[in-house]
Image (cartoon, grey):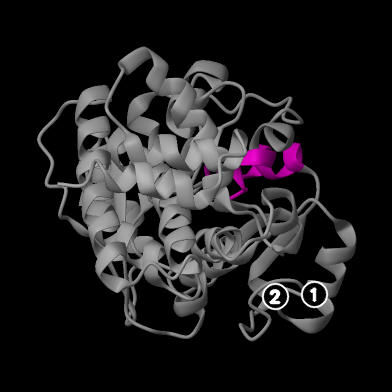
Amino acid sequence: MEFPGKIAVMGGGSWATALAKLLLNNCEEILWYMRRDDRIEDFKRLRHNPAYLSDVEFDINRIEFSSDINYVCSQADTLLLVMPSPYFKSHLEKITVDISQKFVVSAVKGIVPDDNEIISAYMQRVYGIAPERMLVVGGPCHAEEVALGRQSYLTVGCNDINHAREFADMLTGKALRTITSSDVTGIEYAAVLKNVYSIASGIVHGLKAGDNFQAMLVSNALREMERFIDTVSPCPRQICDSVYLGDLLVTSYSRFSRNHNFGSMIGRGYSVSAAKMEMEQTAEGYYGAKCVHEINRKWGVAMPILDGVYDILYRNVKPLNAIRLISETFI
C-alpha cells in the first residue's frame, strides 16, 4: 500500500476540523468519522462544523462522512486520530475490523486513561500497529489560529523519517510549515506535559502572582519536561525545539489555551469541579496530570510542578499553598 493513501479524520472537535482543512488543501478527498449523525447532517447542510470553528467552510463534496467507525477504518489507508484522550478508548473499542496494516497518525494530546500509555504505545500493544506505521503530530499550533490562516508550525514524528516527510507534505501550505522528527515518544510526552504545565501557568495567572513568577514557572517546567522525557525515552533531542519549548510556551500563555483558562479559573477561586463544568471543551492537562503522576511512580523523576498540579486537582490542596511549595524548587 502506498502511503498515505486515503486518509480518514477520526474525531469531530476543533483540532480535527483544523487538520481536515489542512489536508483538503493537498488531498482530493478525505473520509471523516464523527460519532453523531445529527452533527454530520448539520455539517453537510451548513458546509461547516456546526459545533467547532464554524467560520471555516468546507467543500463537502470532497468529504465522505460516516458515524460507522468500522466502515471508515475499512475504507481508509491512514487513520488520523484526533479524539480527546478521555474518550479515545471508548471510540476505538468499537473497532472490530483489522487495522494492523493501516498507517496511524496520532494528533491526540493526551494519554490513554487507566492504561497510562501514550497513544503510540497503546496502538502498538492493542492493535498491532508496527512502529514504522505509527506517526504523531505535535507542536505549537492552536486550532483557532490555523482556522484564521495565521502562520503556524507542526512537527510530524515517525520512526521511519520518510513516512514523516510524506505526511508532513499533506499538511504543508502557505500558512503551515512542517518539521520532521524521529522522536515519537518525546513528542507525545511533551504534548501531555505542556498541558499540565499550562494549568500551572493558568493557576499562577489566576492568583495574580505576576509575569516574573510565571516566567520562572515556565522555565522550570521546561527543565522538568526535559528530565522526564530524557529518562523515559533517552535519545538525542533539543528541548528548545518548537515541538517541546514552542508548544509549552503557546499553551502556557495563549488566550486560546483551554488548559491555561482552566487553571486560571482554579487560581481565581473556582473549585476543580466547577472549573470543569464551566469549560466547553476538554482540558487535557486535568487527565494528563494524573496519568503522568502514576507513570512517574516507576521512574521517580523529580517533578515538583507536576506533583503540585496533581495535588491541587486530585488532593484538594489549596492552590496558593501548592504554588508556594513549587516556588521553593525554582532554580
Secondary structure found at label 2? helix
- Residue 130 appears at what percent x and percent y? 40, 23
Task: Compare residues 213 and 190 and report the one nearer the observer.
Answer: 213
Relative side of 131 to 315, left or right: left
- Residue 98 appears at what percent x and percent y? 63, 24
Task: Compare residues 226 and 202 and report the one nearer the observer.
Answer: 202
Q: What residue lies at 21% left-to-right and 39% top-to-bottom?
A: 226
Task: Compare residues 229 and 237 and report the one nearer the observer.
Answer: 229
Give how far apart the Cα atoms at labels 1 and 2 are: 6 Å
Secondary structure found at label 1? helix
> In the picture, which quadrant includes the N terminus?
top left
Relative side of 245 to 67, left or right: left
- Residue under numbered circle 2: 60
Q: Are marks 1 and 2 in contact (CB under 8 Å)?
A: yes
Q: Quadrant of residue 286?
A: top right
User: Which residue in the rendered view is the most extreme toward the right?
Assistant: 38
Q: What residue lies at 64% left-to-right and 71% top-to-bottom?
A: 62
Q: Residues within 10 Å of mark 2 (few under 14, many from 20)?
A: some
- Residue 201 appears at what percent x and percent y? 40, 59
Taking the magenta stretch, the answer to whether it contains residue 79 is yes
Residue type beneath disc 1: Lys
Highlighted magenta segment, given as a residue range? 69-87
Q: Residues within 10 Å of mark 1 (few under 14, many from 20)?
A: some
Say which mark, if any, is on residue 44: 1
Task: Compare residues 13 and 160 and report the one nearer the observer.
Answer: 13
User: Which residue in the rendered view is the most extreme toward the top?
Assistant: 298
Q: Does residue 188 appear in this view?
A: no
- Residue 305 appears at what percent x and percent y? 36, 42
Q: Quadrant of residue 87?
A: top right
Q: Does residue 143 appear in this view?
A: yes
